[in-house]
Amino acid sequence: MGPLDLRPGSRLAFVTTNPGKFKEAGRALRPLLRLEWVEMGYPELQADDLETVARFGARYAAGLVGRPVMVEDSGLFIEALRGFPGVYSAYVFRTLGNPGVLRLLDGEKNRRAVFRSAVALCAPKGEPLVFRGECRGRIAREGRGRGGFGYDPIFQAGKKAFAEMATAEKNEVSHRGRALRALAAWVVRQQKRSGRASPPARARAGR
Ligand code: IMP
């Protein structure tokens, strides 16, 4: 078994300071994996893409935590703003917030936007593995709903804003839900492979 071989039902540390992400991810991966919340920040590299940020964070966090970890980095890319705020989404949320983003789009007809997620898994001293997901949607004219966190009230996927969805419903369509399903599929594939390579299977194959 390699350091990242996760058996179904095993525990996995999710390093994040965001309780909303932890709730969604715990729900999305249950019962395949049991997430443990490690409430810790990590340096967010100033990079052009989410994947680089997630890789760096996962490597850093795995070194500190001393066991395999998962981290997730997301960004909101607004078409009329040529992809802004993208990798600057956390900073823009802290500084302008949802009212500021709505103001930037005042009078703009093109409301198309995409949320992207990069989930990275890494064992101490190992190479990170990255899973991606995206959700296409629109920036609402005004904030709606009371659920979720961050840009949820202004990001509309289909008819509803993320903030109007229950956690399971958001996971079905969201960037994070999709990235986590890719991770879950990888865990299952890996388990099947290691099952085939187990001693009884090898013995049967050799007969
Ligand atoms: P980060 O992945 O924590 O760097 O997130 C970047 C910014 O996007 C933060 O302000 C988050 O609150 C926000 N964000 C990330 N994921 C979501 C989401 O699923 N819905 C709404 N806002 C999000």
Image (cartoon, rainbow, N blue to C red):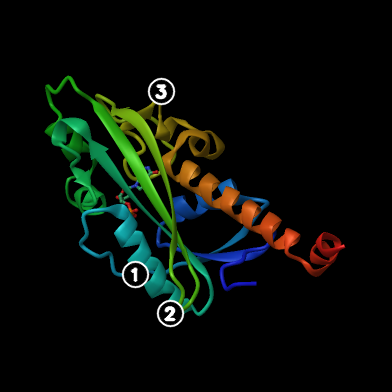
Mark 1: amino acid:
Tyr
Instruction: Return the mark for residue 64.
Output: 2
Q: Is residue 152 visible?
A: yes
Upstream in sequence: badge 1 or badge 2 = 1
Mark 3: amino acid:
Gly
Q: Nearer the viewer, residue 60 or 16?
A: 60
Residue 43 location, x and y as percent?
A: 29, 69
Left or right: 7 as drawn, with respect to 144: right
Upstream in sequence: badge 1 or badge 3 = 1
Which residue is drawn at the image coordinates 61% and 66% (left, top)?
5
Upstream in sequence: badge 3 or badge 2 = 2
- Give the quarter of the figure containing the C terminus: bottom right
Residue 110 location, x and y as percent?
A: 19, 22
How crowded pointer 2 is (Cα within 10 Å; few <14, some 14-19, many 20+) is rated as few
Asked if the residues shown at circle 1 and circle 2 are in contact, with their CB atoms under 8 angstroms apart, the answer is: yes
Asked if the residues shown at circle 3 and circle 2 are in contact, with their CB atoms under 8 angstroms apart, the answer is: no
How crowded pointer 3 is (Cα within 10 Å; few <14, some 14-19, many 20+) is rated as few
**Residue at the disc numbered 1:** 42
**Residue at the disc numbered 3:** 158
Which residue is drawn at the image coordinates 53% and 33% (left, top)?
169
Dividing the picture into quarters, in which one does residue 11 lie? bottom right
- Give the quarter of the figure containing the N terminus: bottom right
Q: Secondary structure at mark 2?
A: helix
**In whole angstroms, how far apart are the C-alphas of marks 3 and 2?**
40 Å
Asked if the residues shown at circle 1 and circle 3 are in contact, with their CB atoms under 8 angstroms apart, the answer is: no
Q: Secondary structure at mark 3?
A: loop
Mark 2: amino acid:
Leu
Q: Is residue 144 visible?
A: no
